[in-house]
Image: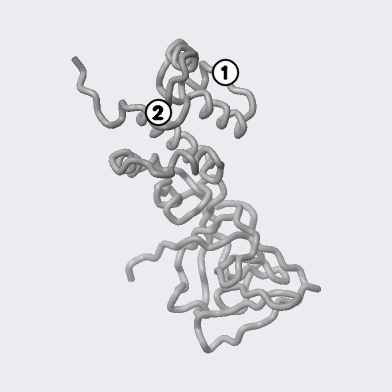
Amino acid sequence: MTKRTILDVPTDFLLEDIINDYKEIVGKISLNDFAKILNTTKQNLSGRKGYGGYLLEKERLLLIKHLTKNDYKETRLYKKLIENINLLVQNELKEDLPEIEIPVRGDVDVSCGHGVSVYNENPTGTCKISQTVLKDYGANVKSTEIVYATGDSMSPEIEAGDALLVDTSQRDIIDGVVYVFSYDGQPMCKRLQRTADSFKAISKNPQYEPFDIDRTLDFRIVGKVVGFMRPIR
C-alpha cells in the first residue's frame, strides 16, 4: 500500500471553486485540459466535483507552478493558493525552474553619465538565466533583457560594464526606483524621482548633479532595472 504524504491530503479549497477561478483568468478551458495541469484525469476531476471534493495539496503545488510559469502571480487565484501554504509544500516550490534565454542588446551602452548612444531595438544575442533568479528579482521572464552600463555616475551602485537586467514590462514610474530610459535620443540609467510636473534624474555618484527631465524633449521609459550581473575584476 502506497504511503500517503502531506501532499496527498485535501486543502480547504473546493475543486469546483478553483476551476471557476482559473476560468476567470483564461476564459474557457475543458475539464480534460485542466486535469492535465493537475496531472490527473478528466474522470477523476469529474467524479470529485460531483460529490463536492477538494483540491489536494499536490494539486495546489502543481497549479501554483503552472500559474508562476505563465506569469499569473498577480491573479486572485494565485494569491489565494499561496496564502497559508504548508511549509513542506513551500519547500517543494523552491526547486529551480528551467533556464530561459533572454535578449542581449550588446550594441546598447546605457549611460550612467551623460548619455552616449541611441537605444538599439535589435538584440545581438541571448543569455541563459535561471527563471527562478528572475522571479526572485520580481522580473517578468517574458520581458526581461540585458543592456550594458557605461560611465560612473551610478557608481558604486552600478559600475561601467555591468550587465543590467531590465524588465521592459515595468514602465510605470515608481518614485526612487532605477530605470533605463531614453532621453532626447540618449539611453540612460538613473534613479527617477517625481517632481510637481515632471521627474528628476538622480545619480548615485555625488559628483553628478541631479537634473530635471524636460518633458518637451523625447522621454521614454525602457524598463525598470531589477538587477545586474558583474564580472569579477
Residue 80 is situated, as x and y percent measured from the top left of the image, at: 49, 40
* Residue 57 figure quarter: top left
Separation of disc 1 and disc 2 at Cα?
17 Å
Q: In the depicted view, which residue is nearer to us: 135 or 47? A: 47
**Residue 190: horizontal and vertical position, in percent?**
58, 73
Spot occupied by residue 118 in the image (x, y as percentages of width and height): 66, 65
Quarter of the image for residue 60 reads top left
Q: Seen in the image, is 83 located left or right of residue 88?
A: right
The residue at which mark 1 appears reads as 30
- Callout 1: SS: loop
Please tell me how crowded label 2 is: few (under 14), some (14-19), or many (20+) other residues with Cα within 10 Å. Answer: many
Q: Amino acid at mark 2?
A: Glu
The residue lying toward the viewer, choosing from 64 and 131, is 64
Q: Residue at the spot x=43%, y=44% of the render?
A: 83
Which numbered marker is on residue 59?
A: 2
Secondary structure at badge 2 equals helix
Question: Dividing the image into 4 quarters, which one contains the C terminus?
Answer: bottom left
Residue at the spot 73% in from the left edge and 78% down from the top edge: 196
Residue 95 visible in rendering: no
